[in-house]
Every structure is written in C-alpha cells, then in structure tokens.
Image: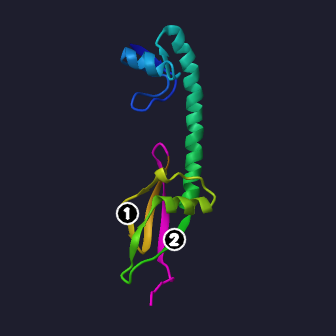
Amino acid sequence: MKVLLLDDVDKLGRIGEIKEVARGYANNFLIPKGLAIVATKSNKKIVEQKKLEAEKRYQRRVKNAKGKKSELESLTLEIEKKAGSSGKLFGAVTSNEIAELIAEKGYDIDKKQIVTQKPIKSVGEHTIYINIYEGIKAAVKLIVKQSNAETKES
C-alpha cells in the first residue's frame, strides 16, 4: 500500500515522501496515529504544504541547535570525585552527574544526549560530546579533580 508521510517516521522516511508499506502497518499504525495518509493526487498537494512548513521548522531547529552548540562548547565543567593516589577514580563519572553539572549552568540536557568516548575513570581533562539535534554535537571540556575530603577510620 502506498502512503504519503505527514510527519517524519523513524526508519521509514521524512515528511512528504511516498512509501510502500504493508497494509496492516498503514491501517493499524500510520494512518490512525496521523503519521500518513493514502497516497492520492489530492493528498499530495496537502502534503506539499505541510512539507514546506516542516522544512521551515527543521531549519529553525537547526539554527537553534547550532547556537546552543557554540554556547555549550564555551563551557568548562568541573567535578570533584574521590580517587586513589594514582589518580584513578573510585567509580566513573556518570552521564547523570554530567547532566546535573550542565543544568547548574542553565542548560536543559537529558542524560541520553551525553556521549563519552569511554568511561571517565581518571582525574584530568576529558572531552564529552552532547548530541543536540540530528548530527549536531557539541564538544564540552570536563575537568575531573581529586576531592580533598579523605575519610579514615580509626
């Protein structure tokens, strides 16, 4: 069954595209959710208008994401963690902790947007990446310091 996408659908296509899908997928999921309509000539005209609007929204989001990227890349995050004498942390810096540090700076970033090359388990300077929007990533400097609070039991 040929359908005309009214919205971007993951792993299927972008708004305005005509796709061949299984009848059940179209009738039970795409059409009831308002993600697609049956591909006809009259429907194509309607979708062209929606496609133009969606393209404008997309361009606006990309512009906002690029602005946010430059703001985030100017940040330097610092965190103190307990570490051994060799500088190895007693556990890793988590994406939750990084998200909290970014939130303290006034940015709303979900922990799922944060990507590290490998787990951060040592004192020093590290680069983390934040997925802002469709292929736009910000590289942020994270400095991990050894905390001075040592606890000894007698």
Q: Is residue 148 within the magenta segment?
A: yes
Q: Position of residue 108 (x, y in %)?
A: 59, 53
Label 2, label 1: how far apart the Cα atoms are: 15 Å
The residue carrying mark 1 is 119
Q: Is residue 121 above or below residue 10?
A: below
Q: Is residue 98 above or below residue 24?
A: below
Q: Which residues are magenta?
A: 133-154
Residue sitting at x 38%, y 84%: 85
Extreme residue toward the top, this view: 41
| Image quarter (top left, top right, bottom left or bottom right) of the C terminus | bottom left
Extreme residue toward the front, this view: 154
What's the residue type where badge 1 is placed? Pro
Quarter holding residue 86: bottom left
Please indicate, yes or no, whether residue 39 appears anywhere in the rendered image: yes
The residue carrying mark 2 is 79
Residue sitting at x 49%, y 26%: 15
Q: How many marks?
A: 2
Residue sitting at x 53%, y 67%: 77
Q: Is residue 105 left or right of residue 116?
A: right
Circle 1 Cα neighbour tier, 10 Å, few/some/many (<14 / 14–19 / ≥20)? few
Identify the secondary structure beneath mark 2.
strand
Q: Is residue 7 left or right of residue 89?
A: right
Identify the secondary structure beneath mark 1.
loop
| Image quarter (top left, top right, bottom left or bottom right) of the N terminus | top left
The mark nearer the N terminus, 2 or 1, is: 2
Q: Position of residue 135 (x, y in %)?
A: 45, 45
